[in-house]
Structures are given as C-alpha cells and as structure tokens.
Amino acid sequence: MKSAREELFIDAHTTYSFTNEPVTDAELTEIYELVKFAPTPMNSQALRVHFVRTPEGKDRLLPLLNEGNREKSASAAAVAILAFDSEFDKFLPEHYPEIPNARDFFKEDDKRLRSAREMAILQAGYFILAVRTVGLDAGPMAGFNHAGVDAEFFSEDSWRSLYVVNIGHSDPEGQRPRNQRLSAERAIRWS
Ligand SMILES: Cc1cc2nc3c(=O)[nH]c(=O)nc-3n(C[C@H](O)[C@H](O)[C@H](O)COP(=O)(O)O)c2cc1C
C-alpha cells in the first residue's frame, strides 16, 4: 500500500484520460467535505463548486473549453467547475465571529473580488489534493472561455469561474510523462 505522500504528491499525476468507471455523487461530495477543513484567510472559504456529471451538463460545458481540452473532459466521469463567490463576505459574521466587523475589510468591490479570487485559488490547490485523497484522479484545466462558462452556469448569481477539474479513474494509456520539477536549490532560500 502506498503512503500518503506517494498517493498525494510523489506518484500522483495530472490526468488527461479516464476509464469508463463511474464516480458517485457521494464521492464528489466527500471531496468538498475534505476541502472545507483546509485553512483560508479569515476562514473566508470563497471557493464554490459546480459538478457537471450528466451528458446534458457536458453538452453545455464542453463547447466552452479550449478545443484541445474537450476530449479530456469528455472522458472524465465528472467535471468540477471551480469558482469563487464574489459575495463570500456575507458569511464572515458566521464563519469568523471573532472579528464582528470583518466584512468592512471587503467593502470596496475591487478588493473583495481580488480577495475572493486569491482565497479560492488557494482552495483549488486543496481541491486537487482532496480528489486524490478520496482515491480519484484529477485533471485541472484553466484553458476555457471563462466569460462563457459564467454566462452559461452562473448568470443568476455571484459565482465566477476559476478552473475546471476533470475527475475520475485514470486510464494508464492516455497519460503524459512527468516533467522535470524545479530543484530545491533553485526554489528555496535560507536565512
Ligand atoms: C491550474 C491549472 C491549470 C491547468 N490548465 C491546463 C489546461 O488548460 N490544459 C491541460 O491540458 N493541462 C492543464 N494543466 C495541467 C498541467 O500542465 C499539469 O498539471 C502539470 O504539467 C503537471 O503535470 P503532472 O502532474 O503530470 O506532473 C493545468 C494545471 C493546473 C494546476
């Protein structure tokens, strides 16, 4: 049996092609149930997730992906649209009661939007690791028409798309080799 560090980091790869094995809504929900525990600034939790797992949902999403990305999502059992909530601050009084006026920090639209995006991007990293934690494989992608996805899926609300993540069981046939990683010597400084 693999160790957690092998499952989540050392042996885990971005997945580009999936088997036909289905993924249940319970498994997809479990991903979020893990993500929610990972830390965010002021417990802001700006990430939102729309799971696309029906043929009808994929018909709406796939034309909005970059052409080279469509086949990857077509083969995935589910595709998560990761979004940030531009009105994440409305939950702060509930989620961060130790600062009762926490919402005041985000009064200006610019700052609120920038913060929501940054906080949700942090959670998107957690999301990829949570997919691996529940025993599934993930293929995150930024190559899609964000405005188009927002218009198709989020026109009625304050959610805005960030990434899509293909989810399922990796097909060993359609994968790519691991590219070189930046060495510790290049990435770390000490004082
Ligand atoms: C936020 C993000 C966006 C990405 N966007 C795309 C994409 O649009 N299309 C694609 O084929 N791969 C995309 N990738 C995949 C990366 O190229 C891949 O994760 C990286 O090269 C590491 O591959 P490995 O996990 O197999 O080592 C994306 C990855 C991340 C994390």
Image (tube, rainbow, N blue to C red):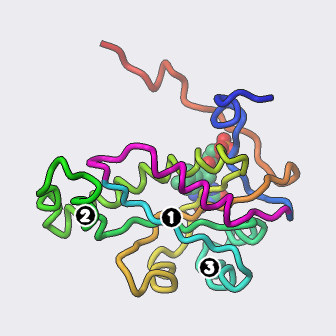
Provide residue 142's location: percent of width, then percent of height.
54, 62
Whole-angstrom CA distance, mark 1 to mark 3, is 13 Å
The residue at the point 27 percent across, 60 percent down is 114
- Whether residue 163 is in magenta: the answer is no
Q: Are marks 1 and 2 in contact (CB under 8 Å)?
A: no
Could you tell me the amino acid type at mark 1?
Answer: Leu
Residue extending furthest top? Answer: 191
The vertical placement of 56 against 110, above or below, is below
- The magenta span reads 21-43
| Residue 82 badge | 1
Could you tell me the amino acid type at mark 3?
Answer: Leu
Could you tell me the amino acid type at mark 2?
Answer: Asp
| Residue 61 badge | 3
On the picture, is 54 further left or further right than 93? right
**Quick one: label 2, few (<14), some, or many (20+) residues within 10 Å?**
many
Provide residue 95's location: percent of width, then percent of height.
29, 55
Instruction: Place residue 94 in its image quadrant.
Output: bottom left
Instruction: Place residue 107 in its image quadrant.
Output: bottom left
The mark lying in front, picked from 1 and 2, is 2
| Residue 89 badge | 2
